[in-house]
Amino acid sequence: MSLEKMGAVLATKVLCDNIVVAEDVNLSLPDITFITAEVNGLGKINIPTCLTEAMQSTVSSVGMDKGFFNMLGLNSKTFEYRFVANNLETSGDTGVKGYKAFLRGIPSNIPGGAVEPGSSWSGDVTFEVTRYQLYADGVERILIDKLKGVCKINGKDYAKEIQSLL
């Protein structure tokens, strides 16, 4: 079985509460770190659970424009990240694939940064993520909703059994 190869990211777009706030900026998708439970069996084994550590995401903004200020506040916001990447298929043909990430989060900072004549200002806005959903080429691959108790990876909801027993 041959794997397709993801190439360079060609473009990005960020929406906050359904308003375009940034284009062609750096994004960081949340790392998902599962909380482990210790089990004994000829020594200790750390087994991942469907519970996760805190998740964060970052948008690098260039300039203090209206889009930048729309991302700020102390209330929950809905974000949509869109990005397109080159793709090398097993046949040797190249194409593009689209990715979308839907996040709910609360901004946790207001970036300062250096202001220098002749240079562009940029700063990273960081969000504490409560919900993260990732689509790759139109297929949902990840859905973590910390407030609703969902931990879905490649179509399997690992938290569903827990919810059914409560």
Image: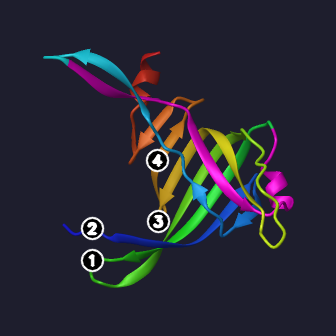
Relative to 157, is 98 on the left or the right? Answer: right
Q: In which quarter of the image is residue 44?
A: top left
Distance from disc 4 to disc 3, alpha carbons, whole Å, reads: 13 Å
Q: Where is residue 39 in the image (x, y as percent from the top left)?
A: 26, 17
Query: To which residue does mark 2 refer?
Result: 3
Density class for disc 3 (Cα within 10 Å; few <14, some 14-19, many ≥20) is: few
Density class for disc 4 (Cα within 10 Å; few <14, some 14-19, many ≥20) is: some
Distance from disc 3 to disc 1, alpha carbons, whole Å, reads: 16 Å
Q: Position of residue 51 (x, y in %)?
A: 45, 28
Query: To which residue does mark 1 refer?
Result: 90
Q: In which quarter of the image is the N terminus?
A: bottom left
Density class for disc 2 (Cα within 10 Å; few <14, some 14-19, many ≥20) is: few
Q: Give the range drawn in magenta.
A: 44-73
- Residue at 17 percent across and 17 percent down: it is 43
Q: For the residue marked with disc 3, what is the amino acid?
A: Asp
Query: To which residue does mark 4 refer?
Result: 142
Q: Where is residue 70 in the image (x, y as percent from the top left)?
A: 82, 53
Residue 71: within the magenta? yes
Query: To which residue does mark 3 refer?
Result: 137
In contact (CB < 8 Å): disc 3 and disc 1: no
